[in-house]
Image (tube, rainbow, N blue to C red):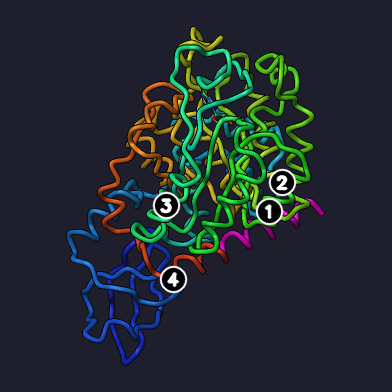
Amino acid sequence: MCLTIPAKVKSTEGQTAVIITSQGDKQIKNSLIPDLQAGDWILYINEIALRKIPADEAGEILNLLEDSSTTINLSKLSEHFRQIIEASEQRDLTKEEIIYLLKTSGEEHRALLSQADNVRRTYIKDFICIHGIIEFSNHCLQDCHYCGLNKNNQQITRYRLTPKQIIEVASNAVENKGYKLLVLQSGQDPYYTDELLIKIIQEIKQHHRVFLILSVGERNYESYKKLYEAGASGVLFRFESANEKLFKKIHPNGKSWEARFEHLDFMHKLGYFVATGSIVGLPGQSIEDTANDILCTVKWAHMASLGPFISTPNTLLDKQTSGSAEQTIKVMAILRLMMKHARIPVSTALETVGGEEARIQALKSGANSLMFNLTPPEFRSLYQIYPDKFFETETVWQKYGLFNYEESYQMLEERMTRAIEENNLRLL
Ligand code: 5AD
């Protein structure tokens, strides 16, 4: 489902209306609201007015999503900064340029975030998408040193949802709440055989118009081929770190660095919509590593999936310092400068570290989607990848989301295709 940014109507004539947007005045079609008048506030998508909303509610959404700070005057900033921003409009940034942006502070830091916001507005226009995630099992045969679900953690209660439960949650999300994209996530849990996952995917896809993204860890090419044919259209599969040495240090057994990229390669070839990325602020990570992670995300992702490292009890990294919301948002902003059409969701990890404030800041710095947790409440607290996980209260977003509009699905499809095209051009 999507949340569009409201606009005020400047004038109407017959079946058209002129609205005032952050990008200037815009003419749109109006066949759905017969009594539309100048001064009204509306929600619109794909150049069509959808419905009127009260002025105070429009104000509430604008407060959440619009950057009220005064526009930054680029001419006052350093020549080098300006050159990098200009270059980002024409070509990919180099590692050195990315490092410069990662180190910005003060005005330049603010300008980076606001420039990313501009790019989001220009290319993706005025809306935010809300996706859902169902965490269906916390069993895992991996032992990633940062993750609370690692197989050596005896302190957590493990659970699995039955196929029936998973299908019920998904059906309810699509039919009653209007979700158009769902992530099905678990630890790497072989209990869910290909056959079982196929049954679940087919059952959901047969009855509901929804994009399914799988986040189930490493499986071979044949498995992912079958799952794609069954109807899964995306994968969420992070490479975690582009630095091979660092990766090996925190995954000494199990997960292999080479295998991460072999998977990403065949996932692309199979036609999956690929969500991937890294963890920001891993212990031992340098600023160069972060720049390389950005370049690697740009290369492999249609959707950038990243969040700060969170120090987690009962893991080998439990004494380390967590990554910061500020650095994660900077990374997201740089990714937006480089990936104009990509989906960049605000991760739960970012919300956990920085709360509602970080979420809003990220949405004003290039991010364009949110991921709500749809795991049944009795299991949510057991999915402890990291502690004190942020849970959405959903109120404001639920109220304004364009839940059951078919346009919302079409728009998502268009956007996903654009992101894939953009990435294909880069891989040529
Ligand atoms: N901090 C941040 N991210 C984590 N993940 C797992 N544990 C942590 C942690 N402690 C991320 C990994 C994984 C995704 C599902 O969650 O990147 O791929």
Amino acid type indicated by mark 2? Tyr
> Which residue is the site of mark 2?
224
Task: Mark 4 and mark 3 in contact? Answer it, CB < 8 Å.
Answer: no
Residue visible at 71% across and 16% down in the picture: 253
Amino acid type indicated by mark 4? Glu
Q: Distance between the residues labelled 1 and 3?
A: 23 Å
> Which residue is the site of mark 4?
406
> Which residue is the site of mark 3?
130
Residue 14 image offset from top left, x and y in percent: 32, 92
Other residues around mark 3 within 10 Å, as few (<14) / some (14–19) / many (≥20): many
The residue carrying mark 2 has its beta carbon less than 8 Å from ligand 1:
no
Q: Which of marks 4 and 3 is in front?
A: 4
- Sequence-first disc among 4 and 3: 3
- Sequence-first disc among 2 and 4: 2
Magenta residues span 414-428
Task: Mark 1 and mark 3 in contact? Answer it, CB < 8 Å.
Answer: no
Residue visible at 38% across and 32% down in the picture: 380
Task: Mark 2 and mark 4 in contact? Answer it, CB < 8 Å.
Answer: no
